[in-house]
Amino acid sequence: MNNTNTNLSTFSTLFLVKGILTLCFSLFFILYGCIGIIIGHSEEWSHETGSFPVNPGLIFIIIGGIGFIISVIIGILTLMASKYLKDVRNYNFIFVMAVLNCLTGILGILLGIFTIIDLSKPEVKQLFFKE
């Protein structure tokens, strides 16, 4: 087994961990939405006070729902990239996921940059595009 395969298997494991962490982070948005439900059903907002045109709990629910959906999608796509790295296929998908992970915090930045560097090596490209 050469060094390239070892790097790809390491990145596969790191993408798996990152995907699981992203899915766990999505639970934060469920909590955020629940806080919105609690705020929305409090007695202060159940009456028409006229001070706010919109119930502030609704804002929490919307942000929580959108954040949850985005986190779950990114988590699932990261898990798929982990599987594709393990199988050494779908080079373009893995490359796009490495770039997308650069937008998701310090762990994603490090993982994305090192994955892009490794994917850019000619011997790694040959593994993906062998005929």
Image (cartoon, helix red, strand yellow):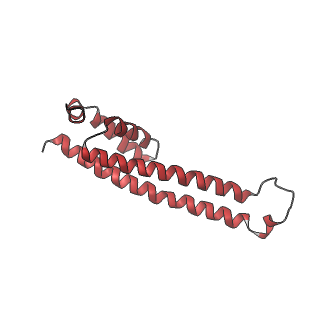
Identify which residue is drawn at 23% across, 44% down.
7
Expressed as whole percent of the image width and height from the top left, the position of residue 58 reads 70, 57
Relative to residue 20, is residue 31 drawn left or right? right
Relative to residue 49, is residue 59 drawn left or right? left
Q: Nearer the viewer, residue 103 or 131?
A: 131
Q: Nearer the viewer, residue 23 or 113?
A: 23
Identify which residue is drawn at 42% across, 51% down.
76
Identify which residue is drawn at 78% across, 54% down.
54
Expressed as whole percent of the image width and height from the top left, the position of residue 89 reads 28, 40
Q: Quadrant of the C terminus?
A: top left
Expressed as whole percent of the image width and height from the top left, the position of residue 66 reads 59, 51
Q: Quadrant of the N terminus?
A: top left
Q: Is residue 34 above or below residue 125?
A: below
Q: Nearer the viewer, residue 26 or 106?
A: 26
Residue 94 quadrant: top left
Residue extending furthest bottom?
A: 43
Expressed as whole percent of the image width and height from the top left, the position of residue 82 reads 32, 48
Residue 119 quadrant: top left
Q: Nearer the viewer, residue 56 or 114?
A: 56
